[in-house]
Amino acid sequence: MRSYSFKCFTLEDLEFWARATHLVEAIPDTMDKPIRCHEVARAVGRILDLPVVDGHYGAVDHSWLMTRTRSNKPKILDVYSVGRLPQVQLLVLDPGTSHTTIFRPGPYRTDIRNDVVEHMVGFFLVESL
């Protein structure tokens, strides 16, 4: 069945989602430091050239990406979904969904561990060779 969601997303949105899923699946579980959504979003965003949004998912500090496609509705590309599977999710910000109240943008984070971001970006670049 093709749900309403198939009308919300462009082919470009779906390509971002597929590429982000591939990147996140490639992150090794054996990284030296704990991985947070804030760093994963920045590493994947750098590879896909998508902007990061820091804020909250409900009451939880969270970071996600925004797609920039020709559609008139903004889309969230959540690469580290909180308590949901699959881990990488594509969501439309539409008044008919609850996403507009659950995902709340906030101030830009200043506690980003850039060494972790750089390690993931380097890993992505090596994996793509």
Image: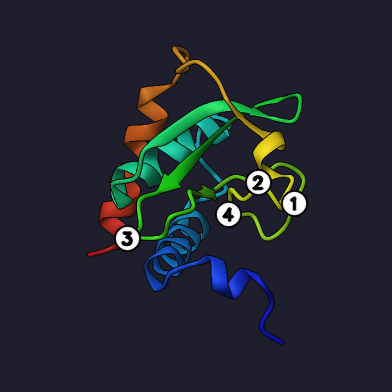
| Quarter of the figure with residue 6 | bottom right
* Res. 127 mark: 3
Residue at 56%, 35% (x, y): give it.
Answer: 37
From the image, state whether disc 1 or disc 3 is nearer to you: 1
Tell me which amino acid carries mark 1. Answer: Arg
Tell me which amino acid carries mark 4. Answer: Val
Mark 1 vs mark 3: which is more N-terminal?
1
- Do tag 3 and tag 4 residues touch (Cβ < 8 Å)? no
* Res. 81 mark: 2
Helix, strand or loop at label 3? It is helix
Mark 2 vs mark 3: which is more N-terminal?
2
Question: Label 1 to label 3, Cα distance in Å?
Answer: 26 Å
Residue at 74%, 45% (x, y): give it.
Answer: 98
- Relative depth, front residue between 86 and 98: 98
Give the residue number, with chain letter if any, for mark 1.
84
Mark 4 vs mark 1: which is more N-terminal?
1
Mark 3 vs mark 4: which is more N-terminal?
4
- Do tag 2 and tag 1 residues touch (Cβ < 8 Å)? yes
From the image, state whether disc 3 or disc 4 is nearer to you: 4
From the image, state whether disc 2 or disc 3 is nearer to you: 2
